[in-house]
Image (tube, rainbow, N blue to C red):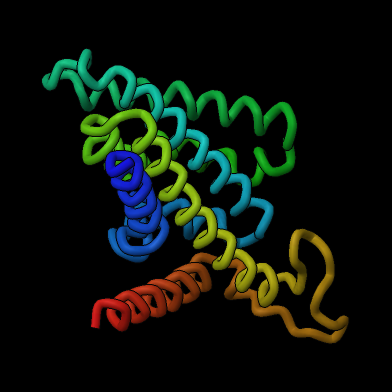
Amino acid sequence: MKSSTLSKGQSLKTFINGVWRDHPIFSMILGICSALAVSNKVENAIAMGAGVTFVLLATGLLIAMLRRLIPTRVRMITYMIVIATFVIVVDRVLKALFPDISQAIGPYVGLIITNCIIMGRAEAFYIQNRIGQSLIDALANGFGYTYTLVSVAVVRELLGFGTILGFQVMPAGFTKWVVMAMAPGAFFVLAVFIWIGRSLAGMEEE
């Protein structure tokens, strides 16, 4: 009973850390290249978030399963091969089922291979923990990454295009903020989100 309670407590702590306390973007400023590149529209952000979450889960599962078999000297190259394999799966699925989204974010899907969030979790967590905890950590980090991308994309698409998921939301006379569809708009919105997230985290610690 005590072991079960401890396990549940540890799992909850792992999830909260990934979603909030050790948020990959707010806390560690990782994965911001893709966050800036694909957050111009909500559908693109959802696709990238889902792709990264899948790769995190698949990598966490495989690395945790093989953690006792992977020699220390080849750990990094092993991570790269595993991550690249699952990124290819994501790329093929997008091309087959969502060609428009694939065309929009295609160049950035391949960059998931070098995403510091995945490499960092593989080295810092998956290689040291069992499958259950690794999957929870992967899900938490994937969710944290995805909700940030989607939140940024909602602001950028709404102001830059007047739409959400392609549906017109703003009135016909709304003047579109062209800057929000460009890189400077992404930097500004993400900076505000990081500021708010870190401020809330600081208040929580106090």
Q: In terms of depth relative to the viewer, which is nearer, 17 or 122?
A: 17
Q: Is residue 171 left or right of residue 28?
A: right
Task: Identify the residue at the far top of this view.
Answer: 69
Residue at 36% across, 40% down? 118
Image spot of residue 73 (x, y percent): 12, 20
Q: Quadrant of the N terminus?
A: top left
Residue at 46% across, 44% down? 139
Whether 174 is drawn above or below 150: the answer is below
Task: Identify the residue at the far right of this view.
Answer: 172
Q: In terms of depth relative to the viewer, which is nearer, 72 or 18?
A: 18
Q: Is residue 33 left or right of residue 101?
A: left
Whether 57 is drawn above or below 175: the answer is above
**Count of picture labels:** 0
Q: Quadrant of the C terminus?
A: bottom left
Task: Identify the residue at the far left of this view.
Answer: 73
Residue at 41% across, 79% down? 196
Quarter of the figure with residue 113: top left
Task: Identify the residue at the far front of this view.
Answer: 1
Image spot of residue 201 (x, y percent): 32, 75
Image spot of residue 52 (x, y percent): 49, 41
Q: Is residue 53 left or right of residue 100?
A: left
Residue at 55% across, 39% down? 51
